[in-house]
Image (cartoon, rainbow, N blue to C red):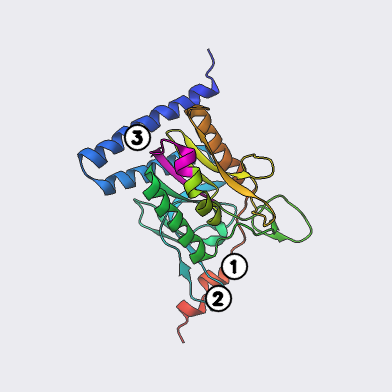
Amino acid sequence: MSTTFKELYNTHLKYIEYLLERTHIYHKSLKNIKETGDDVETEIRNFITYFIPNRFRVTHGYIAYIKDNNSEPIISPQIDLIIVDELVPNKIFSLGKSDGIDIVPVESVVGIFEIKRTLNDNSLTKSITHLSEIKKSVEIVKDNPVYYLPGGDSTEDLKTGFHSNPFIGIISLANEFSNPKAEFVNKFSGELIKNEIDAVIALDGFLGCLIDGTNGNILLETVRRKDKDYWYGFLSNDKFGQVSLISRSIGMIITYLSYTTGKRMKFENYFFNRKNWQTI
């Protein structure tokens, strides 16, 4: 008897249920908040790694940005999950072998995510603020219309279909929204749109995502346009089932990444930076 696609996803659902129970014990019984947070972040990074194409790498740490080789390098706040394009240079430093914290150039970044164990008003507000701080610190934008070739070279006349604007999201194991439309969409839509967050995902069965105001479809475009009307919609497992929501969530990320590329890094800015390494 052959295995069905749904059975494969159900295997992952059982693992998510196990993680929820394990982190509940850490958090409630052992009062170990740090252990809970570290465990959730590691497991969600592993979970995303299972699905994304081999061309991309999942890591965590910091993003570096340098305007030119005579400017002060800027390091972002810490980021729970970073996806980088391995077709371009994608690592400057690694800090420690056990936890695998990387400092990556902003040009290589195609996705950034906040990770939470449980999504609620407080954790969502903090996540939105943190992602906004990350974007501003290293000048990540969502409206760069330039086309690129895979490998990072920009093209002026050739419309390749590849842009460089990273996917921005929030992922949690569970959520505490009993009425998503009232508690999530109505309350947070404005902030999520303003801060250019593509999706809010809870693996227990919740997906809040950017919707194209023209046709009502889930937005999968890699460039935010000024002339478009965007709004936030939600899907819940009451209507679609948890397997469907996880499939849609992963599908959003993979589809977006398939039209996104890193940019060619200017090596002179990072490795021959006069501001930091000049000896005379």
- How packed mark 2 is, by other alpha carbons closer than 10 Å (few <14, some 14-19, many 20 or more), is some
As drawn, is 203 to the left or to the right of 150? left
> Which element type, helix, strand or loop, lies under badge 3?
helix
Can you give x and y, in whole percent of width and height, for residue 220 in the image? 63, 44
Three-letter residue code for mark 3: Leu
- Tell me if mark 3 has few (under 14), some (14-19) or many (20+) residues whose alpha carbon lies within 10 angstroms of its own: some
- Residue 212, above or below 135: above
Q: How many marks?
A: 3
Residue 273 in sight here? yes
Instruction: Residue type at mark 2: give it.
Output: Asn
In the picture of the structure, the residue carrying the numbered disc 3 is 19
Where residue 96 appears, as percent x and y from the top left, is 35, 56
**Distance of label 1 from label 3 (alpha carbons):** 41 Å
- Side of 43 relative to 253 (left or right): left
Residue identifier under label 1:
266
Look at 48% across and 79% down and name the residue there: 275
Question: Relative to 140, does residue 222 appear above or below in the rendering?
Answer: above
| Range covered by the magenta-colored residues | 168-184
- The percent position of residue 52, horizontal first and vertical second, equals 54, 41
